[in-house]
């Protein structure tokens, strides 16, 4: 978490989809977040291994992988990063049933699955709750 009240929370986004990445980054930045971006797992591991990532939250969406596979990747990235023990991990699955849209599931501790819905503020509201 951030110590200073004026410091923007930082989200480390790992997003493979070129069409999704830009609007997601713009939305997060307009929500007041600083966003660090990696385009895949290899780039993310390079960034955290080089000490270039000081984030408050990891947000991951990988193409063609199950939520369990994405969660495993996100945990590996978070574990490789230098952090103070509290860094929420949010996985956004690519495919899911309509009935879970806009909901979140706490898997354990700081590990979450977020099923994006059509309402534009759902993700921002969820991230605000996690980072407060």
Image (cartoon, grey):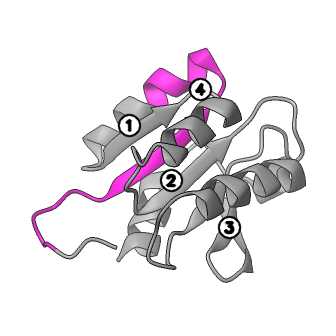
Which secondary structure lies at badge 3?
strand
**In the rendered structure, are the residues bearing label 1 and label 2 in contact, judged by CB atoms less than 8 Å apart?**
yes
Query: Which label is found at residue 82?
Result: none
Question: Alpha-carbon distance for marks 4 and 3?
Answer: 20 Å
Residue 11 lies in the magenta stretch = yes
Q: Residue 9: image x %, image y %?
A: 29, 59
If you read the primary sequence from the N terminus, does the residue marked by circle 1 or circle 2 appear first? Answer: 1
Q: Which of 62 and 46 is in front in this view?
A: 46
Residue 39 is marked as 4
For mark 4, give the secondary structure: loop
Residue at the extreme front: 50
* 12, above or below 14, in the image: below
Range of the magenta residues? 4-24
> Mark 2 = which residue?
123
Mark toward the viewer: 1 or 4: 4
**In this rendering, position of residue 90 left or right of residue 9:** right
Mark 1 / mark 4, whichever is N-terminal: 1
Q: Give the residue at x 49% y 78%.
A: 86
- Residue 27 numbered mark, or none: 1
Q: Which of the numbered marks, if any, corresponds to residue 112?
A: 3
Q: Distance between the residues labelled 2 and 4?
A: 20 Å
Q: Is mark 4 in CB contact (under 8 Å) with mark 3? A: no
Residue at the image position 46 percent from the left and 34 percent from the top = 37
Residue 88 is inside the magenta segment: no
């Amino acid at each position: 978490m951030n110590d200073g009240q004026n410091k923007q929370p930082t989200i480390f986004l790992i997003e493979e989809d070129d069409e999704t990445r830009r609007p997601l980054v713009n939305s997060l930045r307009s929500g007041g977040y600083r966003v660090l971006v990696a385009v895949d797992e290899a780039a993310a591991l390079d960034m955290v291994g080089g000490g270039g990532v000081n984030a408050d939250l990891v947000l991951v969406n990988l193409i063609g992988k199950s939520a369990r596979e994405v969660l495993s990747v996100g945990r590996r990235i978070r574990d490789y990063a230098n952090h103070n023990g509290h860094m929420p991990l949010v996985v956004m699955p690519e495919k899911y049933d309509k009935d879970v849209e806009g909901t979140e599931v706490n898997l354990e501790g700081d590990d979450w699955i977020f099923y994006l819905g059509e309402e534009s503020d759902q993700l921002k509201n969820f991230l605000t709750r996690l980072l407060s």
